Amino acid sequence: MSTPTWGLDPKARRISVYYFGTSTIYEGMPVCYDNSTTNWMGVDGSKIDFTTTASTASLESTTTADGYQNEGKFIRVENPNADNVSMFAGVVAGGDHVGQTGPRAIDIYIPNGAVVPVRTDSNCLIDQTILAITTGSQELGVPLATDSRAVAIARETVDRGTAGLVLAELNPSRFIFQDSGGTALSIDDADTTTASLVNYINLNFLGSSTSSRGLYAVGQLNGGGSNYGMWKFRTYINAQMTSTVHTLCANLHIKDDGKLVDAGEWASSPLYLTVETETTTTQPTLSGGSIAAIYVGYYCDETTAGPANAYVMHFNNHPSYNWDGLLRFGAGDLGDSDQAGTGAHVIGFDGDGDIRKIPVLIDATTYYILVGTAAAETDD
C-alpha cells in the first residue's frame, strides 16, 4: 500500500535514508540508525542519487576525513537490534522501494509526533495501544522488558493478528527510555566534587485544590503477574562509598510559613501507603494470601562479612527532636482476640480489655507484644 501524501497528518515529515539490510522492505516497518558504522555516503549529489530504486552499495566509503561528521550515523539505517534500539529512525514510507529487498535508498517518516501508517502485529485500540520496536522484529509490537522501546500510540482500532498497517502517532518522547541498548547511560566523572542530577522537576502549586501532584503514575495488572512490583527502584554500589546510600528518598519539608492540619488519626508523612479494595457490590477475594502495607526484605549474604547492624531504623541526630512513639493505630479500628481465623486481627485485647496484644509472626508462630496504659500495667 502506498499512502498519498495529501492523506497524512500535515506534520508528517519524510526523509531519504540508506537501508543497508538485506530483508524485504515493508511499508510502515521500523528502522534504526546504525550506531557503530564507519561507513558513510556522500550527500553532495554526485555520489548518491536517492531517487533511484537501484542498489547504491557501490557508492559507500569506509573512511571519513578527520574532523568531519560520519554521515553514516544519520543516513544508514537497519532493522532494530540490541545495539541500535535506542536510536529509532522512523518507519518506512510508501514508495517504489516497498516490496523490494535491501540494500537500497528508502524514504521514512521520522518520529515527530505525526500520525502515519505503521506496520504492526498487535490488536490495536484507538488512543490506547502502545506500540514498540523490538530487536529482530520488522513490525511494531508489545513493549518488552529487554531490547525494546515504546515509540507510538495507535490512532485507530484494528486487530492486526497478521502484520499489517495501522495509523499511529509516532512519538517516542511520550515515553521514558534512558538506556543504550541494555547498557547504562553514563555520567561523566570529570567533576567528582558536586552532586549529579539527570531528571529534575521543580513545581510551585499556587492554588488550593484538594490534591496537587508533581508526578502521577497509574499501572493496572489485568493479566496477573508482576511479583517484583509495579514500580521498581534499584541502586547499585560499585565502589567504596564515602557516605550513606539510599535507593529512594522522600522528604516532607515544612517551611517557615508551613502549618500542619489537625486531622485526628491521620498524620502527615513523607510516605503514605495504603492497601485498598473497591467499594462496589462485588468485592475482591483476599483469602488467597497475606497482605502488607509495608514489606521489608533483607537479602545480604553474611557468610563473608555481614554489616555491623541490620534493622528497620529510626534515627535522631538532633537534641531538640522528639520521637513520640514507635507505632500508632486508629483506636476505632482495633480488633479483638475473639475474631475467628489465625491472624484475623491486627491488635487484640486480653480478657479484661486493658492490655492489648500486638501479634508478631516469627517462623509461622504467632508471638505477642503486650502494650497497655500505666493503670493497666499496675492492675497486672
Image (cartoon, rainbow, N blue to C red):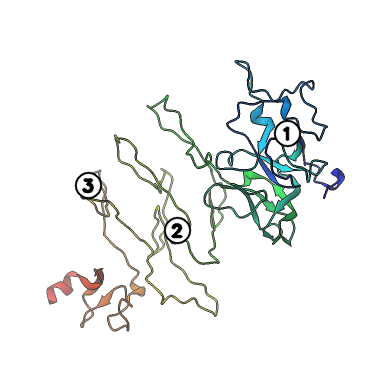
> Is residue 352 visible from the viewing direction of this image?
yes
- Left/right placement of residue 316 relative to residue 168 reads left
* Residue 319 image offset from top left, x and y in percent: 23, 44
Amino acid marked by disc 3: Pro
Residue that mark 1 sits on: 17
Taking the view exactly as shown, the residue that stands out farthest to the top is 66
Q: Nearer the viewer, residue 144 or 228?
A: 144
Identify the residue shown where x is 80% and y is 46%.
Answer: 9
SS at badge 2: loop
SS at badge 3: loop
Residue that mark 2 sits on: 229
Q: Nearer the viewer, residue 42 or 372?
A: 42
Mark 2 or 3, nearer chain start: 2
- Left/right placement of residue 279 relative to residue 63 reads left
Mark 3 or 1, nearer chain start: 1
Amino acid marked by disc 2: Gly
Mark 2 or 1, nearer chain start: 1
